[in-house]
């Protein structure tokens, strides 16, 4: 009988990405997010741009809630939810921008 032992074999896959989306319509949102120059935008500016994208790809009339999280200097490099007031401000700006586009 032969016994083999040692440290467990661990395989890790590390992926680097700047933005993603989950939920219904995620593929269209993810494509539009990937088109943004997220290396150059500030995180706060990106929140506003991404809110516009989410409103654009949402195809139903029923209301929806935007939840965002980030890893940046503002969050001390930790994965945390974007502050609710910033998300609300971005949500309002996105709605206003879409309404003004529809009026034109």
Image (cartoon, helix red, strand yellow):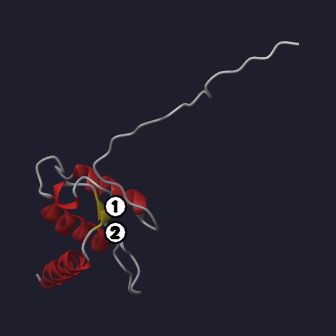
Front position in the image: 58 or 86: 86
Neighbour tally class for label 1: few under 14, some 14-19, many 20 plus, Cα within 10 Å: many
Neighbour tally class for label 2: few under 14, some 14-19, many 20 plus, Cα within 10 Å: some
Could you tell me which residue is drawn at 24 percent across and 75 percent down? 87
In this rendering, is residue 71 above or below 93? Answer: above
Q: Earlier in the sequence, mark 2 or mark 1?
A: 1
Total number of numbered discs in the rendering: 2
Front position in the image: 47 or 2: 2
In this rendering, is residue 7 above or below 48? Answer: above
Residue under label 2, please give it: 57
Q: In the image, 102: left or right of 65? A: left
- Contact (CB < 8 A) between labels 2 and 1? yes
Q: In the image, 7: left or right of 53? A: right
Could you tell me residue 17's position as x and y percent?
Answer: 32, 45
Could you tell me which residue is drawn at 37 percent across and 80 percent down? 65
Q: In the image, 91: left or right of 10? A: left
Could you tell me residue 79's position as x and y percent?
Answer: 33, 58
Residue under label 1, please give it: 29
Could you tell me residue 1's position as x and y percent?
Answer: 88, 13
Front position in the image: 100 or 69: 69
Identify the image quadrant of residue 64: bottom left
Could you tell me which residue is drawn at 12 percent across and 57 percent down? 42
The CA span between labels 2 and 1 is 6 Å
């Amino acid at each position: 009988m032969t016994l083999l032992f040692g440290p467990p074999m661990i395989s890790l896959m590390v992926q680097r990405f700047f933005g993603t989306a989950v939920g219904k319509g995620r593929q269209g949102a993810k494509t539009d997010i990937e088109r943004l120059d997220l290396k150059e935008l500030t995180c706060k500016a990106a929140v506003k741009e991404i809110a516009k994208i989410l409103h654009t790809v949402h195809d139903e009339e029923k209301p929806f809630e935007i939840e965002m999280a980030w890893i940046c200097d503002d969050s001390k490099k930790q994965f945390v939810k974007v502050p609710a007031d910033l998300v609300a401000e971005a949500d309002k700006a996105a709605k206003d921008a879409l309404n003004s586009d529809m009026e034109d």
